[in-house]
Image (tube, rainbow, N blue to C red):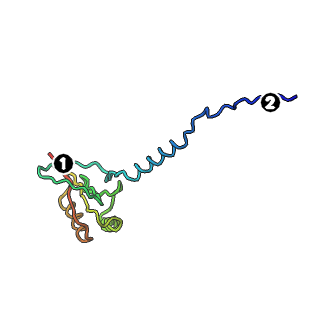
Amino acid sequence: MRNRTNKAQPQGEAIDLTPMLDVVFIMLIFFIVTASFIKLPGVEVNKYDAVTADPYKKVGILVAVSETNEYWIDKKRVETTALKLNLTRLFNENPKGGMVIQADNESNIETVAKVADIARDIGITPVAISVEKD
């Protein structure tokens, strides 16, 4: 004869982590998409000291002028002849953002003014100069 014993099979001894991992990945994607990224020009700049400085939040374009009067945009050195082309491209990508110029203490004012003049010709407004607040 057959032995017909009904023994209960062990169930659910492992915890299913799939729903928790789904939630974690959704939160990770949310934080990556909503994070505001800090733009860096690509060169170390010693800024001017200023007592009267107003904070400016809407930075669309960031240009750095080094102590040797070189232009830096998006961690790349830009020649003077290509400056207008690069600024036009960045302005077309984000027409609502303004421009901030990070000028080194040792840079010439003519070099900084040239960047501001090109920005004005393109139509970028406002143009601000980044300073070190006391």
The amino acid type, in three-letter code, at marker 2 is Arg
| Mark closer to the chain start, 1 or 2 | 2
| Image coordinates for residue 107, horizontal then vertical, percent | 21, 54
Q: Is mark 2 on a helix, strand or loop?
A: loop
How packed mark 1 is, by other alpha carbons closer than 10 Å (few <14, some 14-19, many 20 or more), is few
Residue at image mark 1: 132
Residue at image mark 2: 4
- Tell me what residue is drawn at x 69 percent, y 30 percent: 8
Does 12 appear above or below 86?
Answer: above
Instruction: Count the numbered circles shown.
Output: 2
Q: Is residue 74 left or right of residue 17?
A: left
- Tell me what residue is drawn at x 51 percent, y 46 percent: 22
Question: Looking at this view, is 56 or 68 the one in front?
Answer: 56
| Image coordinates for residue 33, horizontal then vertical, percent | 40, 53
Q: What element carries label 1?
A: strand
The amino acid type, in three-letter code, at marker 1 is Glu
- Tell me what residue is drawn at x 13 percent, y 50 percent: 50
How packed mark 2 is, by other alpha carbons closer than 10 Å (few <14, some 14-19, many 20 or more), is few
Q: Nearer the viewer, mark 1 or mark 2?
A: 2
State which quarter of the image contains the C terminus: top left
| Image coordinates for residue 30, horizontal then vertical, percent | 42, 50
Quarter holding residue 96: bottom left
Disc 1 and disc 2: Cα gap in Å? 86 Å
Quarter holding residue 115: bottom left
